[in-house]
Image (cartoon, rainbow, N blue to C red):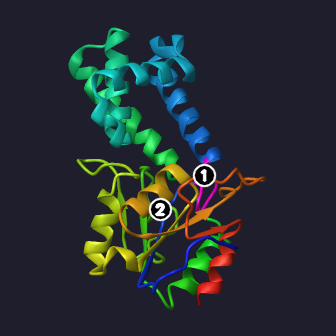
Amino acid sequence: MQIFRRLKPIAAISFDLDDTLYDNRPVIMAAELAQQMYLARHYPVTKAWGRDEWRHHKLRVLVHHPMLAHDPTALRLLTLHSGLLYFGLPEAEATMAARAVMDEFIRARSHFRVPESSLQLLAKLGQKYPLIGLTNGNVDPVRIGLGDRLAFVLAAGSGVRMKPVDDLFRMGCNRLGIASEQLLHVGDSHSADVVGALKAGCQAVLLNPAHGGLEPGPLASPLPHLQIQKLDALLALL
């Protein structure tokens, strides 16, 4: 553990989910593959596009709908809908098909369980602190085993902007009934988690490397309060 700023009294701890409590890379790869297989099986005309073509199409959608950058579910749904229209599906069929493909992606997106080491850590920390989740992603926290570990999970989307914007931090503190400086946020992303927490007036812990990573990345400014290489280092807070 590296200490860069003196910690103030902590009333609660928030966690990023993806790549903090588990390695999200294989999860997303599996979900993307499930989406491609579903499209190929039910709408074979779309076989002309692979993952790269769909990714480029999503970037084109973002150009016309920049606010969807804060809503990954709505962005994917619109990307699917407009892509299916491009392949010639009628409007009504494209709408139903996009929803069906999205459902398949979400199913695969949450088809795993958080590692037991993370669940045990949360159980120990939860004996002293209220624990919550603040995520930019769209995983189902209950399906992956976090339902009884986190008091609640707040996610970006539906008008709630992604970290590093302060929406999730502000909402979390308000719901907990604490001042922002009493929340300690733990995450793997400097740009989203550290910058977002500090801008919101919270305290920040950077997990570096991210869950499943091998080598820590270089430090950037602003510095977090703490930097840890393993989540177990948080047990020092007990």
Residue 99, x across and y down, in percent: 32, 34
Residue 6, x across and y down, in percent: 55, 79
Amino acid type assigned to the residue bearing label 2 in the image: Arg
Residue 168, x across and y down, in percent: 33, 60
The answer to if 169 sits in the magenta stretch is no
Q: Which residue is mark 2?
A: 143
Q: Which residue is mark 1?
A: 220
Please tell me whether mark 2 sits on a helix, a strand or a loop. Answer: loop
List the single residue furthest toward the right.
214
Please tell me whether mark 1 sits on a helix, a strand or a loop. Answer: loop
Residue positioned 42% across, 23% down in the render:
59
Q: Is residue 175 above or below residue 92?
A: below
Query: CB atoms at circles 2 and 1 under 8 Å apart?
Result: no
Amino acid type assigned to the residue bearing label 1 in the image: Ala
Residue positioned 28% across, 21% down in the render:
64
Q: Quadrant of the C terminus?
A: bottom right
Image quadrant in which you'd find residue 235: bottom right
Image quadrant in which you'd find residue 66: top left
Q: CA distance from mark 2 to mark 1?
A: 34 Å
The answer to whether residue 111 of the structure is visible from this angle is no
Is 103 displayed left or right of 1 in the figure? left
Q: Which residues are magenta?
A: 19-24
Q: Say which of 184 and 146 sits in front.
A: 184
